[in-house]
Amino acid sequence: MAQAARGQERGRGWSLGRRIAAIVLLTALPLLAATLTTIGRLTDAAREAQLAGLRYSARAIAVGLDAQLGKYLTLAEILSASPNLLNDDLTQFAVEARRTFSQIPDVWIVVADLDGRQLLNTFTDAPASLPMRHPVALAGQKRAFEARGPRLAGVRLDPVGLTFVATVETPVFKDGAPFRALAVTMTMKPFARLLAAQQMPEGWLAGILDEAGLYVARVPGGEYLVGQQAAPGWRETAGREGRFEFDSRDGVALINENAVTTLGGWTVGVGVSKQALDAAAFDSIRWSTLAALALMGATLGLAGLLARAVMRPLSELTAFVRDPPLRSRRPPTSPRSRRCAARWSRRASTRTRMKGGRLCCWRRRRDCWR
């Protein structure tokens, strides 16, 4: 009860202007809260749409990469079953291999013995000068024989073509025993074209890593990064699907979506910097945000004008009533205030006349009784 009484006393101390201002604020605050909440939800929705785009792009590239690698693997299995591959003279097989890959650019065939000595390389016509195979290729060749099936060997610099390549290693058996290795050698250009065909939005990064964490391709700047190690954060998350956050090679904070290929376990990543993601999210809702803020500002301005329009005549009337001697010097200015003041003056004059009439009647009665 005491608290209620104190609250009423404080309420009685409020001026009319404060009360109207409080009403305006109480009306505007829910609108302000609703506007800010809507803007926040729109921003979150736009951000999630960007992240969903990352996930979709990564999976689309992984599907295309699987299709590309699957084509090479199928051709390797077809050639590995050729009887000409079992001959000591590989001339007929070389003709067959070149014919098979005549319509496929940036690919050639390598045949090697179990020790990694190259017996045939369709990239060159000088078999006598062929070097030993790269250690990465030898490791892939060994895995293929252990698995008795095709395996993917990672990125390295080819000593013959002097370009970065990867290979599909296919084991060749003769009478059930390991005999030779057939390798479909691929440059990185087809994979770079695969990434470039995706037409990434500005600020996005896309790349492909082999199992060792080396760049197979990347956009933008892939021609300078092929064969180099990716950022430590990406290497740590390679081979795992999902969304990860780490710093790029340039130290920029990224949000990256990983997708892993079915063949070879290569990792496809599509990322965007956090700053670019937030900027894109704001751009997508910019006009909606500005419209909401403009509407809120117009509403508050209109409420202020209405409060001012109500307060002005009330303030003038209050001053007129509280300070009658100043009426002639400070007459009300607004029409409504003048009407109210005139009405108040007429009522005051009427009360004065009535009071004077009652006083005269009382005096007459007093004189009659004397």
Image (tube, rainbow, N blue to C red):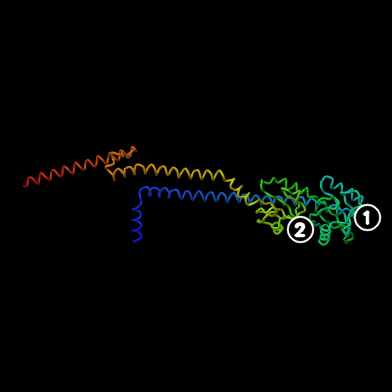
Q: Residue furthest left?
A: 370
For the residue carrying disc 1, how many other residues have a C-alpha within 10 Å: few (<14), some (14-19), or many (20+)?
A: few
The location of residue 108, given as percent across then percent down, is 84, 49
The location of residue 287, given as percent across then percent down, is 56, 43
Q: Nearer the viewer, residue 219 or 37?
A: 219
For the residue carrying disc 2, how many other residues have a C-alpha within 10 Å: few (<14), some (14-19), or many (20+)?
A: some
Residue shown at 44%/42% (left/top)?
Answer: 302
- Mark earlier in primary sequence (2, 1): 1
Secondary element at tag 2 = loop
245 on left or right of 298? right
Q: Nearer the viewer, residue 57 or 235?
A: 235
Identify the image quadrant of the N terminus.
bottom left
345 on left or right of 233? left
CA gap, disc 2 and disc 1: 35 Å
The location of residue 296, given as percent across then percent down, is 48, 45
The location of residue 328, given as percent across then percent down, is 28, 38
Up the image or down, 262 lies above or below 303; here it is below
Q: Nearer the viewer, residue 165 or 5?
A: 5
Q: Which residue is mark 2?
A: 212
Q: Residue furthest right?
A: 89
Q: Which residue is mark 1?
A: 88
Mark 2 or 1: in front is: 2
Q: Amino acid at mark 1?
A: Asp
Q: Amino acid at mark 2?
A: Ala
249 on left or right of 147? left
Residue shown at 83%/45% (left/top)?
Answer: 103
Secondary element at tag 1 = loop
Up the image or down, 9 lies above or below 341; here it is below
Q: Nearer the viewer, residue 226 or 316?
A: 316
Q: Quadrant of residue 8?
A: bottom left
